[in-house]
Amino acid sequence: MANTENEVTIERHPVDASIQENRLPPTSLIICSRNRPKLLAETIESVLQGEEVPAELVIVDQSDVRDSKLETFTTSRPCHLRYVKSDLIGLSRARNSGIAAATHDILAIIDDDMFVAPTWFGLLIRELVSSGMRTVGTGRVLSTAPEVPGGFVPAQAVREDPATYQGRISRDVLAGGHMAAYRSIFDDIGGFDERLGAGSGFPSAEDNDFGFRLLEAGYQIKYAPAPVLYHRAWRGKGEYLSIRWNYGRGKGGFYTKYLSLKDVHMIRRIMWDIGHRVLLFPYRICTHPRRACGDVVYIGGIVSGVAHWLWLQLPRNAK
């Protein structure tokens, strides 16, 4: 797992097994950001306005300029803010750095462009604690109203009934920007793959990869609809196709990481991901032309990601 550039000694605070039912265990909430100080500040404010707050808020900042306000930030809420400035780039690297810097054994992760419901934090952590140490918890991610003309969010999780996922499944169910887990899970299966995720050559699917490894290792992912995050629709319509390309690139890398003729699971998944979009294209081009164009770009991104991942493996395979 990646660490921050400056080596520091971190004092760990293990979970107290005798915690009363109505009291939250100490938790570190990790938020990673790069060059979005206003969005980040408003996300932090939203968290601190919740009915319950994390014991620690770990901010991993990959911005070009240090945030002097966050370096000296204090709050009247029972929450300590730990500011980690990083010169590295990449969401997976940032999350891994946040995990390493956090001082508690329950970790939650959200993105820097979120608003949280007032009850969100308590509901998410209590769901995790009630489910046990072999569970990763996640919840709903809804869109805010557009903040700019044509504003959109790249992904949502709108399911209204709970679900528990175990074993090998055919889709991705973990939202990396809305999750909670015990540190022991990261110690066991490792952190986020730093070849994947925003800021890397395969700029998405780091959460897909982590979720797949979780399930393959025998852990479970529990989706609870009660904890709600609101993903801000601040991206304009002009960014839609580039986002779809990036999502496809990441998915292509993720699929290719596990491609094998001996285990055709990922071959089937990539065929379905591309195939059903091709079949739906005639309908969508008439009814939802923007989405149809996005599907074409997404498929192109997958093909590009597959080719690039395979190309990167050539020198290793030639030895």
Image: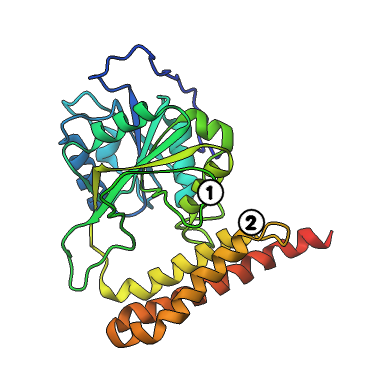
Helix, strand or loop at label 1? It is: helix
Query: Residue 292's spot in the image, x, y percent?
Result: 37, 81
In the image, farthest residue toward the right: 319
User: How does the figure colour the protein chain or chains?
Assistant: rainbow
Query: Residue 260's spot in the image, x, y percent?
Result: 70, 60
Query: Residue 176's spot in the image, x, y percent?
Result: 40, 48
Front residue of this view, candidates 263 and 47: 263
Q: Are marks 2 and 1 in contact (CB under 8 Å)?
A: yes
In the shown orientation, is residue 12 left or right of residue 43?
Answer: right
Task: Say which mark, if any, is on residue 258.
Answer: 2
Q: Identify the residue shown where x is 37% and y is 75%.
A: 241
Q: Identify the residue shown where x is 45% and y is 81%.
A: 279
Placement of 241 over or under 48, stated as above or below: below
Residue type, mark 1 in image:
Phe
Placement of 162 over or under 21, stated as above or below: below
Rendering quarter of residue 13:
top left
Helix, strand or loop at label 2? It is: loop
Query: Residue 89's spot in the image, x, y percent?
Result: 47, 52
User: Which quarter shows the C terminus?
Assistant: bottom right
Residue type, mark 2 in image:
Tyr
Q: Identify the residue shown where x is 26% and y is 18%.
A: 21
Placement of 90 over or under 267, stated as above or below: above
State how many labels appear.
Answer: 2
Residue, disc 1: 212
Q: What is the crowding at mark 2: few (fewer than 14 residues within 10 Å), some, or many (at least 20)?
A: some
Give the Cα distance between marks 2 and 1. 10 Å
